[in-house]
Image: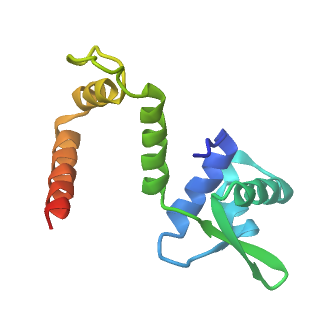
Amino acid sequence: MVRLGDLERAVMDVLWDRSPEEGARLTVREVAEALTARELAYTTVMTVLDRLAGKGMVQRQRAGRAWSYRPAASREAYIAQLMLDALDLAGEAAPGQRGGADRLGRGAALVRFARSVTGSEAEILRAALTDQAADRND
């Protein structure tokens, strides 16, 4: 998964916030105008969008003489992939290794993550796991 720099993240936030409906696109000018607090040049925003297109983070399409852009995936999908990538860093537990939260591997990372979420976040996770289990049984 692509890690984003601060400016890339700011541009993606604009795209995620302003083009939530399927197929909605923004021009470079519209993105630049939304980033007024940063006082960025049009060409800077254009370069960032071009790089994001090269990384597969945005899809672009010609709109007359200009390009228009939309996110290639939702913010939620991007963040979920970041979480999975972080989980992959933990690796798997060594063969024969057993035990609780202190063992190495994905299981230990998941346990530590589960213990760090709020009660409402835990309820969301429980519901998602219940849905996943039901889907597997269908």
Q: Residue furthest front?
A: 96
Give the image location of residue 122, x and y in percent. Answer: 19, 40
* Image position of 111 (left or right of 26): left
| Residue 26 placement: quadrant | bottom right
| Image: 23 above or below 80 | below
| Residue 91 placement: quadrant | top left
Q: In front here: 131 or 59?
A: 131
| Image: 136 above or below 39 | below
Give the image location of residue 11, x and y in percent. Answer: 65, 54
Give the image location of residue 103, x and y in percent. Answer: 30, 16
Q: How is the image coloured?
A: rainbow
* Image position of 124 (left or right of 10): left
Q: Residue at x 67, y 54 (%)?
A: 35
Q: Residue at x 36, y 20 (%)?
A: 94
Q: Residue at x 45, y 56 (%)?
A: 77
| Image: 47 above or below 19 | above
Q: Residue at x 30, y 23 (%)?
A: 108
Give the image location of residue 40, x and y in percent. Answer: 78, 50
Could you tell me which quadrant the C terminus lies in? Answer: bottom left
* Image position of 105 (left or right of 59): left
